[in-house]
Amino acid sequence: TQAVGVLALQGDVREHVHALEAVGARAVPVRRRSELDAVDALVIPGGESTTIDKLLRAFELVDPVRERLRAGMPAYGSCAGMILLADRVLGGIEGQQTLGGVDVTVRRNAFGRQVDSFETDLAIDGIEDGPLHAVFIRAPWVEEVGPAATVVGRVEAGPAAGRIVAVRQGPLLVTSFHPEVTGDTRVHRLFVQIVRDTQE
Ligand code: GLN
């Protein structure tokens, strides 16, 4: 079984752990470097990207995570996790850094005040058996996609129709929405499949 770390500095850590275990992975909370070293992959939960950025620095995890990402470690980032895995961020606070890895520009809190949290059904390339219920909470969207990255999901209806909300780049997967709150484990299943494929 794959050991999938869940960055446990802030956010829905327990929900991600449960979803990963439901799809057959061994889920391990990661707060220290030694814990990072022991996992095959990493999930970065939603929360507040500015806070997670500060905590990553305080826990001296920025360089270790960047090194693992550069070495090809699979990672999945949801919402704030998407921001942290993006190469470029708009609407960040002064000095906000990302870990990078995915060749996209994301915009923080992009959906605006009227619809800053909403739910909608959408399709994700690589996920079968019908649309996914996507929950957005003060979410970013992807404003620009570089040549290395592939769009795998967009909002399909409503005022934000067409906005890019899921991107894949090799072993990296990012979504604007929070799959861990719905009980639908298909995004986690896709990610664990990516982890398995990477190991082969
Ligand atoms: N707005 C948050 C940020 O900019 C993300 C929100 C979330 O992760 N639910 O980091």
Image: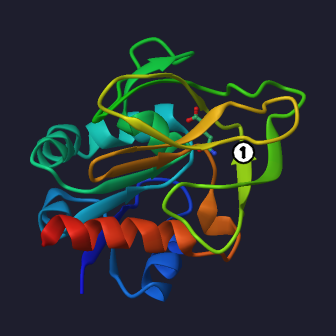
Q: How many marks?
A: 1
Q: In terms of image quarters, where does ligand 1 lie?
A: top right
x and y, in percent, of residue 37 in the image: 12, 63
Tell me where residue 147 appears, x and y as whole percent. 33, 25
- Identify residue for label 1: 137
In this orientation, which residue lies closer to the viewer: 156 or 89?
156
User: What residue lies at 32% left-to-right and 54% top-to-bottom?
Assistant: 75
Residue 51 seen in the current view: no
Residue 97: x percent and y percent?
Answer: 35, 24
Picture quadrant of residue 161: top right
Mark 1 near ligand 1 (CB under 8 Å)? Answer: yes
Which amino acid, mark 1? Ile
Relative vertical location of residue 32 with respect to residue 99 in this rendering, above or below? below
Location of residue 182 with respect to 178 vertically, above or below: below
Quick one: 66 or 33, which is closer to the camera? Answer: 66
- The quadrant of the picture occupied by the N terminus is bottom left
How crowded pointer 1 is (Cα within 10 Å; few <14, some 14-19, many 20+) is rated as many
User: Residue 160 location, x and y as percent?
Assistant: 79, 30
Q: Residue shown at 61%/62% (left/top)?
A: 179
Quarter of the image with the C terminus is bottom left
SS class of the residue under badge 1? strand
Task: Place residue 105 in its image quadrant.
Answer: top left
Residue 170 shows in this picture: yes
Q: In the visual, does 174 lie left or right of 131?
A: left
